[in-house]
Amino acid sequence: MNEAGSPKPSRWPGRVCYLLTILATAAATYGVVALLMNIRERKEEAKEHYLKLVNLTEDTIDPAEWGKNFPRQYDSYLRTAENTSRRHGGSEAISKLEDDPRLVRIFAGYPFSVDYRERRGHAFMLEDQDNTERVKKFKQPGACLHCHASLIPAYRTAGGGDVMKGFELVCAMPLKDARKLVDHPVACIDCHDPQSLQLRVTRPGFLNGIKEFAKHVAAELAKDDAKKPEDRNPPAPHLTSIHQWAKHHNRGDTKDDYDVNALATRQELRSFVCGQCHVEYYFKGDKKTVTYPWHKGLKVEQIESYYDEQNFKDYIHGETGAAVLKAQHPEFEMWNQGVHARSGVSCADCHMPYQREGAIKVSDHQVRSPLLNIARACQTCHRYPEAELKSRALAIQSRNKALMDRAETALVELQDALKAAKEKSADAAAVKEAQALQRKALWRVDFVNSENSLGFHAPQEAARILGEAIDYARQGQIKMLGGSGN
Ligand code: HEC
Ligand code: HEC
Ligand code: HEC
Ligand code: HEC
Ligand code: HEC
């Protein structure tokens, strides 16, 4: 029996192993499936299951109402009131003019030479505008509110149901009258559809501006067709929906303008919602209509050439008499020139990264510097230690700052030369040329200075612009020193 059964003991464990393997596999499979189902359920939960306590409409401006349905996003939104200033301490809005007195001379003759501060969190946008000397000491139009308040319902009311008409009317009003129509800084309704919660763009300035930019893209693509493939350089190729529209437009498949809310991809909207306000703008004509100058493209010299064509100036320079431009926070334009945009990385990826709350993914609505949140803002893509990432970003910023210092110094020295030449009543034609060079240099210095990432959004582009600024400033200075019209 032992002899005959001798194979048994050795076969027995074999069978046990076999059975166990089957059981283990089944259990593992069950486990994986259960886990997948669980994850999926939770994802669905995260997406759809919220307690709809309040019915939100196009008139629900108050974020507290939205907060009843979406408490997580509301909580982080409220934290934009926390002091996050990275370059300076204290909860005061810091003066840029005290930090860098050259700016007082660069903006001579313009309200910015009187009061110009570091930006703060979104919660402050309305009160900081109320309190700036640029508003208290100077008359401003209702157009100022376009990016500092939640005001689409006010536009709708003013326009008798027509938002675009109301927008134009409110822009033209005196600011102190228009101010009575609004009471909230940027709110949920400015970026979200109240029913579907989809991202959307509401600011008329952006809706109009991006249409013009799309037309520019179409015109450039048409020119590209005639070029050799290696010579083609289409504008902003990462904005795929605009490129698609442009191709349809050029083929005659569509007569409609580019409609951002109908056509933009979700990833594009994750930047476009910010591009509603973080952009260069001007007030067009006597009606002071907020206009984004993207008709000839988003780059610094393309915007300049649009302004030149419009014969536009922001102010007559107080020291030199030159007709000059003031740039305003062109974050969206600069981001478009950088490697992150080209790689499909949106503003929200860095400034509103996801945070997990249990199985739920929530976008951090405490919009702030990503350097305060490197783990979530950068390390999802870059697998380097936090300190390494921070030092790379700071290295970009300090190189940018060093070049900007040189550009500002060059610009102020051009102003000195122009002032001295005018006192000696130098050749009028030479003065005019130097004034034109001042306009170019100032526009470029300010484009980089007023862009709030200190070069990070597009380091190479910022350096290119500052290089040109230094060159234009020194060319102008040489013209004045030489005293000839050459
Ligand atoms: C196109 C959108 C837009 C319009 C129009 C606009 N702003 Fe702003 N404003 C911003 C953004 C974005 C910031 C934050 C970035 C910055 O400070 O550079 C800002 C910052 C500010 C600040 C705080 C920092 C500073 O500059 O001292 C004040 C004050 C201000 N704006 C006043 C005004 C006034 C006055 C007007 C009208 C003349 C105006 N804004 C029109 C978008 C806009
Ligand atoms: C400046 C624009 C902006 C404002 C203002 C804003 N959001 Fe969002 N919100 C976003 C972006 C961007 C996302 C990411 C959406 C995506 O990727 O589809 C988002 C996502 C969400 C989501 C989807 C889940 C998530 O967290 O990703 C909810 C819910 C939400 N927001 C609620 C709110 C509420 C409530 C408010 C007001 C208290 C608000 N949002 C204000 C831009 C904004
Ligand atoms: C309705 C216009 C508006 C929209 C939309 C908007 N911003 Fe702002 N943002 C402002 C203004 C104005 C300020 C300056 C407020 C101040 O200084 O009082 C500002 C300030 C900021 C700051 C500085 C915060 C700090 O702590 O210093 C960051 C970062 C920022 N915005 C990023 C974004 C991003 C990213 C988006 C899109 C998700 C966005 N903003 C959407 C108008 C806007
Ligand atoms: C790849 C990440 C990334 C993307 C994408 C990005 N930013 Fe930034 N942004 C940064 C970093 C890093 C800074 C520098 C922050 C600092 O100096 O503390 C910055 C600074 C800013 C500031 C000044 C904030 C402050 O606290 O000083 C604003 C405003 C801003 N970005 C808006 C935008 C907008 C609008 C977009 C999209 C059009 C955008 N950013 C896209 C990383 C990004
Ligand atoms: C969604 C992904 C993503 C996020 C988030 C992101 N990056 Fe990047 N980053 C990229 C990609 C893609 C490139 C392009 C280079 C490449 O292909 O490796 C890049 C390039 C860079 C570069 C080199 C290019 C340059 O502009 O000089 C630096 C530095 C950088 N990232 C830093 C950061 C920092 C700091 C943050 C957080 C504030 C950040 N990135 C967030 C994807 C990301």
Image (cartoon, rainbow, N blue to C red):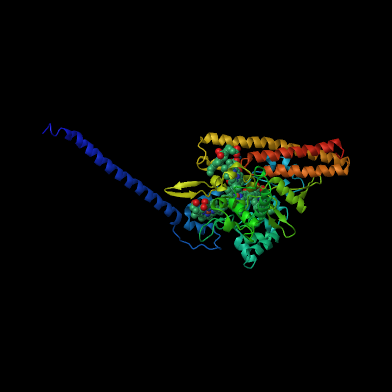
Q: Residue furthest top?
A: 3
Report how many numbered discs are placed on residues in the image.
0
Residue name at image x 80 percent, y 37 percent: 477
Snapshot quadrant of residue 369: top right
Q: Indicate the position of residue 218 as horizontal and vertical percent values.
A: 66, 53
Residue name at image x 61 percent, y 47 percent: 237
Residue beneath the point at 79% across and 38% down: 475
> Height in image: 484 above or below 132?
above
The residue lying toward the viewer, choosing from 374 and 129, is: 374
**Rendered location of residue 335, percent (x, y):** 62, 45
Spot the residue most to the bottom. Answer: 160
- Quadrant position of the C terminus in the picture: top right
Left/right of residue 299 with respect to residue 311 in the rendered view: left
- Residue 89 visible in the shown view: no
In this view, which residue lies farthest toward the left? 1
Q: In the rendering, at what x and y percent does residue 55 appear?
A: 49, 63
Do we see residue 33 in this rendering? yes
Q: Position of residue 240 (x, y in %)?
A: 59, 50
